[in-house]
Amino acid sequence: IDVLLNNAGVGVRSKPFESLDFAEMEEFFAINTVGALRVFRVLLPGLRAGSGKKVVNMTSRMGSIGDNTSGAAYSYRASKAALNMATRSLAVDYRAEGFICVVLHPGWVVTDMGGAGAPVKPEDSIFGLLRVIDGLQASDSGEHIDFTGTRVPW
């Protein structure tokens, strides 16, 4: 296995804090964070045997602490921030083995989750993500990058 692309996720359900459903939050963490780590662990032997050793976890700019200016969406934001931190730890822990571990933000894409008003077309996101993944270097490991190749604040 040369590249692992973890792209599972539960969507945004923006509610005020007083309406936060903690069972929903646990579901978001199970899928958005723990799920990616489970897949990595199961595929680790194959990744170690591969030549690329790239681990790409799809995140969201909404998981950025430094870029959060609108609040709410607690379950989604917290689970993606946790994925970001876990990926950063993987980058540190597996760097010596030649792994490149990153989180990628696909942009706000026109999808069922992103909605019809999103500014990024799916084909533009996909093209950009593939370009970023193909160009990943060891110096990128542990970073949060968007589909244009721009670093996202943690």
Image (cartoon, rainbow, N blue to C red):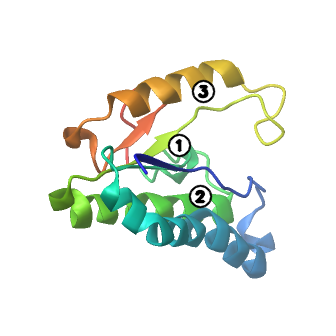
The residue lying at 79 percent from left, 42 percent from top is: 113
What secondary structure is found at the residue carrying circle 2? helix
The dot on residue 61 is 1
Q: Looking at the picture, tell me which residue is in the foreground, 17 or 23.
A: 23
Q: Which of marks 3 and 1 is nearer the N terminus?
A: 1
The residue drawn where x is 72% and y is 74% is: 27
Label 3 environment density (alpha carbons within 10 Å; few <14, some 14–19, many ≥20): some
Q: Mark 3 points at which residue?
A: 126
Question: Residue 54, can we see it?
Answer: yes
Residue at 49%, 71% (x, y): give it: 42
Decide: few, some or many residues near mark 1? Use Cα within 10 Å; few <14, some 14-19, many ≥20: many
| Residue 71 horizontal side relative to residue 18, left or right | left
Amino acid type indicated by mark 2: Arg
User: Dot 2, crowdedness within 10 Å: few (<14), some or many (≥20)?
Assistant: many
**Number of the front mark, 2 or 3:** 3
| Mark carried by residue 119 | none
The residue type indicated by label 1 comes to Arg
Q: Mark 2 points at which residue?
A: 77
Label 3 sits on what residue type? Ile
